[in-house]
Amino acid sequence: MATRERKARAGTETPALPPAPAGDPVRYGLHGNGHTGIEYLTRATPSSKLAVTFSHYGSLNLAMPGFGEDFLLKRGYDVLTLKCNINNWFQDVSIETVQSIMAQLPAYDEIITYGSSMGGYAAMYFAQAVGARVCIALSPQFSIEPAVVPFEMRWAGDAARIHFTHQRLSEVIGHGGTTYYVLFDPHTLDGQHVDMMMEISNRVMPIPIPHSGHPSGVVLQEAGLLASTFDNLVRGKIPDLREPLRKNRRQSASYLSALAQRCIDKRRMQTAEGLLAAACKIGNRADIQLSYSRVLLKNLKPQEAHDALEEAWPKLGHDAHLIAYRAHLQHLTGDIDGAFKSFDDAIRKQPDLLAFYQGERAMFGQVVRDFQNEKRLRDAALARAKAELELHHGQTGSFSRPVMIATFSISLVILLILAGVAITFRLV
């Protein structure tokens, strides 16, 4: 690592950062607005290389390390990392803010940006602002703004609440000297985003990774290929990943899960079930277990679907729709009390759908009441029959075991018929 003086950029009046002690990297907090924090990691002897990274979707803890920190520090980079506690695609950070922070840092011989999904978008958006030679973006979005990408519905809830302040990506990546390496699964909506990027700039280098899902970096990591891919791209070499992925795909739960989704799209449900079962054995991931549960239900295996969901339940985010799905499985598997409780939880969780969930709960309740009424009528009929026997024969009536079994079977059939028609929607 080259020895370089720690000083502010020439031509600026921003004071230099204090000297860092020798040894482990020191973290400096350089910016915070309540939702987004910007931190700088360096050692006493700063590197000649800087990586600017951006947190991915769902990474909402400002106290956690930034995206790829350890990975990059081991490769000799200083790191400037942008983290957030809300999924807002960094719309609360401007290019001017990032440039003012860069002015506080030493001059670097090499700068790259690096991010995944939401962070991949930001890595592309801010690459020119930080003077990056290379941007490595894993499954980035061109935008999530409905007016720009009407086909994109995966983050519709986030898009509805975000106040978009950034320029369009087309206005940012269409010029400058940055090379944008974009890794993505062409079988997902990510492919459409990449097509839009390529229309804007000939410096966008697409690297398709079929059946890697979103984000594609997870498959590379599980297959042991992420580090070598990163190193090659920094050197300007696009690796051929087809053969290594083919050899290592069976050890990637994400690959099997993405392949299963393709089978679901083609209505090959039995194949999808087998792929997801194998994926669950490789990695104990709640999102894959949930997908497995949904496929099992589509394949008419409610008990197995219920068991798969319950295994994943402690690790899942419990939104109203997922809770209602759990209620549905509890109902199908005979846990009536649990289903009622889950429907009540769903109503409390999302009161704006109160009428929907209350209507579903009421319909479900009617099934139970109908069955209870049927049971009371059956018990009354048995009591009358027994009284008639006693009246005509002068003794206590009795029923044979076959008669009792037949009576119970008829009741069970009635219950199943009522249950089968009660809940008409399927949250799968």
Image (cartoon, rainbow, N blue to C red):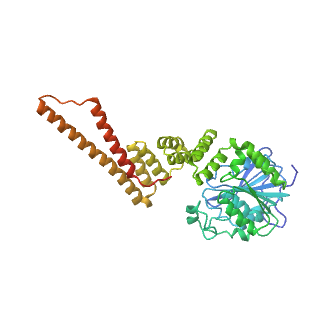
Query: Which residue is more in the foreground, 239 or 3?
Result: 239
Query: Which residue is more in the foreground, 68 or 232?
Result: 232
Q: Position of residue 344 (x, y in %)?
A: 40, 51
Q: Position of residue 12 (x, y in %)?
A: 81, 66
Residue at horizontal 58 percent and vertical 47 percent from the top:
287
In the rendered structure, the answer to whether residue 362 lies left or right of residue 279 reads left
Q: Is residue 231 visible?
A: yes
Indicate whether 166 appears above or below 293.
Answer: below
Query: Which residue is more in the foreground, 166 or 185?
Result: 185
Q: Position of residue 207 (x, y in %)?
A: 76, 56
Q: Is residue 25 visible?
A: no
Rendering quarter of residue 386: top left
Residue at horizontal 64 percent and vertical 60 percent from the top:
189
Query: Which residue is more in the foreground, 22 or 49?
Result: 49
Rendering quarter of residue 286: top right
Rendering quarter of residue 214: bottom right
In the rendered structure, the answer to whether residue 325 lies left or right of residue 336 reads right
In the rendered structure, the answer to whether residue 367 lies left or right of residue 304 reads left
In the rendered structure, the answer to whether residue 324 lies left or right of residue 32 reads left
